Amino acid sequence: MAKRKEKAGEQHATIAHGAEALPAVRVTSYNLELRDRNGFIGDQANKSAFRDAVDGWRKRVREGGPDPLGDVPTDELTKKEIDAPLKDEQSEAAALVLAAVDDFAEALAAILARYLKEEPWKGATKIAVGGGFRDSKAGLMAIAKAQILLKADGRKVELLPIAHHPDEAGLIGAVHLIPSWMLKGHDAILAVDIGGTNIRAGIVKLNLDKKPDFSKAEVWKSELWRHADDEPRRTATIEYLVKMIEALIARAEKAKLALAPVIGIGCPGIIAPDGSIARGGQNLPGGNWESTHFNLPEALRKAIPEIAGQPTFVIMHNDAVVQGLSEVPRMADVERWAAVTIGTGLGNASFERQSPA
């Protein structure tokens, strides 16, 4: 038994965090940090940028009369409240939201056009759009408008909303970080999606008996923590995350679901091979996640040393990469493609299909 564990450990050691070569695809780039005179271009098409567009139109409209969206500050409007006016397209409120959608779509199209000029994105024929903004009518309309603008600019690329709900895509994509030999004989894996506002942990059923390409993988159970409401320190964040994972392990055991001894993580920033965050973790909850003295995979491995009686293996990659990986089955006929996630920031990643060994 000891020899088998040692051999597994050696195989684990060959799998690096933030890797370029993954089982089904090669990650040609992620977290592109392009700038213009206003700073990082991604900041022009994130969740805050859309709300800034809504707020800008509200201020201009108030110059000539009542605000059709009422008195609630823009930052306090929910996604549903912003979407609601779009049910009556003849209303002034709908016209205002649509104006903001148009502004945002122009910014998004311009950013994607800039990305497509970068070497890793050249040849991409499809771009999947995920993140929390995709989970709204305004977001879907902005994606469609950006597609029209790209076509009108002569760019032959298909822009499409990510297939899974964004809350689930960030978990499902984790299955594509892991070699198939590590999943044999197991029903599911644990996955974690860490964002600037929320942390979600879940159990992803592999359903390999239905489809060996993970196209039938699904989130069985998940837990969400909106850490932005609590503003915890880094240590408290890890402690709470461990409790979330332990609760999920208990649920899997109760349901007699065979968990692989694996935790796949999507996390913002540049992920170093040793699992540390080189940069880009500024939106993560309290404390320095980029410290050379902190390693999230190692912290989780120490807190949860075993899963189902086997040594825990933790693998981490950038969150936009992981969400993009959920699209691997849908991109089976595509050689090069990309993904963006519209949330607290604008995540981005590009992929190239691996040739069969």
Image (cartoon, rainbow, N blue to C red):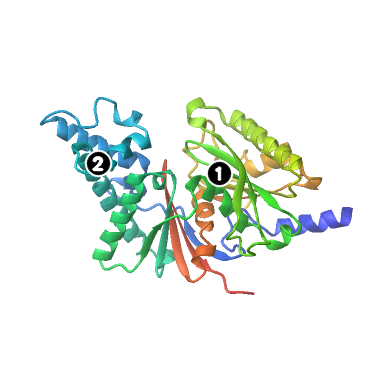
Give left or right: position of 318 versus 55. Answer: right
Tell me if residue 76 comes above or below residue 46 in the rendering: above
- For numbered disc 2, what is the local secondary structure? loop
- For numbered disc 1, what is the local secondary structure? strand
Residue topped by disc 2 = 88
Query: Which class describes the residues within 10 Å of circle 1: few (<14), some (14-19), or many (20+)?
Result: many
**Residue 88, how many percent across, how many down?**
24, 41
Give left or right: position of 302 versus 93. Answer: right
Amino acid type at circle 2 is Asp
Q: Residue at x 73, y 62 (%)?
A: 181
In this rendering, the count of numbered labels is 2
Give whichever of discs 1 and 2 has the lower sequence position: 2
Q: Quadrant of residue 178?
A: bottom right
Can I make out residue 164 in this image? yes
Foreground disc of the pair 1, 2:
2
Q: Which residue is the extreme one toward the right?
A: 1
**Residue 128, how many percent across, how many down?**
43, 58
Tell me if residue 331 comes above or below residue 254 in the rendering: below
Q: Residue at x 31, y 59 (%)?
A: 147
Query: In which quadrant will I find the C terminus?
Result: bottom right
Give left or right: position of 121 versus 239. Answer: left
Q: Residue at x 43, y 43 (%)?
A: 132
Query: Which class describes the residues within 10 Å of circle 2: few (<14), some (14-19), or many (20+)?
Result: few
Can I make out residue 305 in this image? no
Residue topped by disc 1 = 193
**Residue 168, how many percent across, how many down?**
53, 47
**Residue 155, how many percent across, how many down?**
30, 67
Q: Residue at x 54, y 63 (%)?
A: 329
Amino acid type at circle 1 is Asp
Of 223 and 43, which appears nearest the observer? 223
Give the Cα distance between marks 1 and 2: 35 Å
